[in-house]
Amino acid sequence: MPDYRVVAQNEKGKQVKVRVTASDERELKKRLSEKKQTLLYYDEIAKAVPLKPLKKSQLSDFCRQIGELIKSGISILRALEIQGGDESITPYEKDLYMRLRDRVVQGIALSQAMQELTPAFPPLLINMFRAAESSGNMDSTALRLAVQFQKENELESEAKSAMAYPKILGGLLVVVVFVIFGFIMPQFEDLFAEMPVLPLPTRILLGISDFVAAYWYLLIILAALIWMFGGMVGRIPSVRYQIDKFKVRGPLGKLQKVIYSARFARTMSSLYSAGIPIDQCLNIARQTIGNTYIEQQFNEVIKTVQAGGLLSDALDQVDGFVSKLTSVVRVGEETGSLDSMLTSVADNLDFASEQALLRMVKYIEPVMIIIMAVIVGAIIIGVILPIYQSYSTIGAGQ
């Protein structure tokens, strides 16, 4: 419940300033009357709770419950109270939903209240709810968004799960190499010191081993700095733009294009079906793609559509979408069923991206194993080669 800064008058007619916690103005007056005080003025004390974006799973649960509650005849205000009282949600969600509820009590529209709590709620959700408030189909809109956020969450979860094993292999490879060069190779230095001439591979291994053994702490610090400053540099707009461009044109560009196309199609379908003008749909949908390189190309797309051009022709010029998206949009424009065609292609592209992820992981796993085998094999050769040469020399001397 929010805290209020209150100016009240006590039974002696003297003004007092107090701080009261209450759910609304009615409860505030009730608590003051119990103390024989009359409310003169009150102001809500804003809580310094940092706002952060809700996860896709949280957004899906929120939209689903809001849609189901409103569909059953419960008001938005009561639905928010039920959401805020749910014991299964996090304290941050509870505080966020109650702040929404407090704003709705004051007569603010739900979409406007969400916008005031940016970046907790994405632009897609805010604009969809704003359109639903005008058309009166809040329940169906919320349930549609619940499905969309759920599918996006499932795709992201599958991508993380698919990459879990390659990440484990990569981490194991780093640990194995570090242990070999830092602890195992130094054990052979006394043996190799007695040999007059060492093969080049062995000398390289010993040099790396000496460096790792002597400066291992510097390597850890360097890795930490790269991890920290790499993220900061990646957030620089110009750097981010080049990274996003490489995602589209790099080795995994085909997979990324499928994912971006599916994300854009599903968002456009939801916005367009809600009755939002096409140029506004494009302006909102561009923010949900997750690639600044593609996003900046939408300036020309929006200009083309506003000038009366076809959406399919405009999207055909975007570098970052698969050609199937443009073809489906063109069919949707010709048949007048753009929203349903976008939903259909989004489902198809989601399935295609899932299959592509599985294929990519199948390729990554043997590649990682081969890399590990090559590194370990090179180390073994570097250790065995001088020993073999020494035995050959001894045999020749006999």
Image: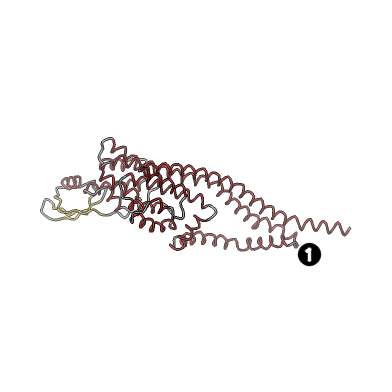
The percent position of residue 85, horizontal first and vertical second, equals 31, 41
The answer to whether residue 89 shows anywhere in this view is no
Badge 1: residue crowd in 10 Å (few <14, some 14–19, many ≥20): few
Q: Position of residue 73 (x, y in %)?
A: 26, 36
Furthest residue toward right: 398
Q: How many marks?
A: 1
Q: Element type at marker 1? A: loop
**In the displayed structure image, the side of residue 185 where residue 222 appears, left or right:** left
In which quadrant will I find the C terminus? Answer: bottom right
Query: Residue reaching furthest front?
Result: 334
Identity of the residue drawn at 10% across and 54% down = 13
Which x, y percent locates residue 218? 57, 63
Determine whether, in the image, residue 28 is placed left or right of residue 183. Answer: left
The three-letter amino acid code for the residue at tag 1 is Pro
Where does label 1 land, which residue? 196
Determine if residue 111 is in view. yes
Which colouring convention does the figure follow? secondary structure
Depth check: give the residue in front, 333 or 153: 333
Which residue is the extreme one toward the bottom?
196
- Residue 269's place in the image compared with 303, above or below, is above
